[in-house]
Amino acid sequence: MTGFEPQLPTYTSSRTAPKQRGTDGTMACICHLMKYWENMWRAVMLLAGWMPFMACAEVYFAQVTKVSDGDTVWVKPEGVAAPRKLRLQGLDAPEICQAWGQSARDALANMVLNVRVQVSVKYEDDYGRGLARLSVDGQDVGAKLVAAGHAWSSRWHRSLGPYAKEEAQAKAGRLGLFAQSQPETPRDFRKRFGSCFPAR
């Protein structure tokens, strides 16, 4: 034997050897945090209208049978008897009792009423409406609606939403509701006056 070799402590059955802190626990903690922030990010993107539609999203063709307001429609899916109520995702149109509310509804009706549309929907809002993207002949209905000045791009905190470019173009051209001197967002309108359909 050369040099000095320290004697390591031994443990009997009455004592438990201290556990070495390895990397498994640390990695599990990191993975848990990453999953948490991923879920939080998905929630923010959904509210902002930026949540991408994944492979499991429901995609079908339907005919629009009714337009309730500037961002709500009823559709009858092909091969399905029951109609479905949908809210356009990624935009916010004026309330029906708000300035430009009826104009926004009429504009949407001119685009899709009694028209065959492609529907992509995965989530539902608090009112049970499917949050949907509609397209006609490959063109995004929401994008056209915002670009013509009939709705705002949905906002969430600092996010300007998926149709920010279309909204900026409509503002620059003073199109639709943006021709008003001080157009009010639907969110601010609801804060001041509540729903257009108060409970009776």
Image (cartoon, rainbow, N blue to C red):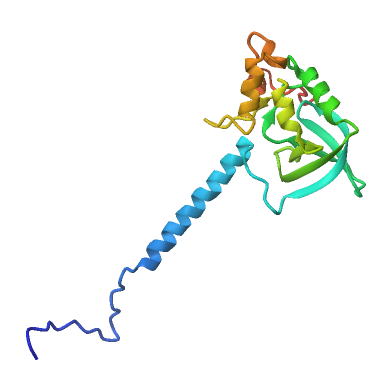
Residue 85 falls left or right of residue 131: right
Q: Quadrant of residue 98?
A: top right
**Quadrant location of the C terminus in the rendered image:** top right
Identify the residue at horizontal 63%, vertical 34% (top origin): 162
Residue 71 falls left or right of residue 18: right
Identify the residue at horizontal 62%, vertical 37% (top origin): 47
**Residue 198, above or below 18:** above
**Residue 4, above or below 34:** below
Residue toward you, 130 or 192:
130
**Residue 78, above or below 13:** above
Q: Quadrant of residue 146?
A: top right
Position in image of residue 179 (x %, y %): 68, 11
Q: Quadrant of residue 6?
A: bottom left
Q: How many numbered marks appear?
A: 0
**Quadrant location of the N terminus in the rendered image:** bottom left
Residue 41 falls left or right of residue 79: left
Position in image of residue 198 (x %, y %): 76, 24
Identify the residue at horizontal 86%, vertical 42% (top origin): 62
Position in image of residue 194 (x %, y %): 69, 22
Residue toward you, 10 or 101:
101
**Residue 180, above or below 94:** above
Residue toward you, 63 or 85:
63
User: Which residue occupies the extreme bottom position in the image?
Assistant: 1
Position in image of residue 92 (x %, y %): 69, 27
Identify the residue at horizontal 55%, vertical 32% (top origin): 159
User: Which residue occupies the extreme top position in the image?
Assistant: 181
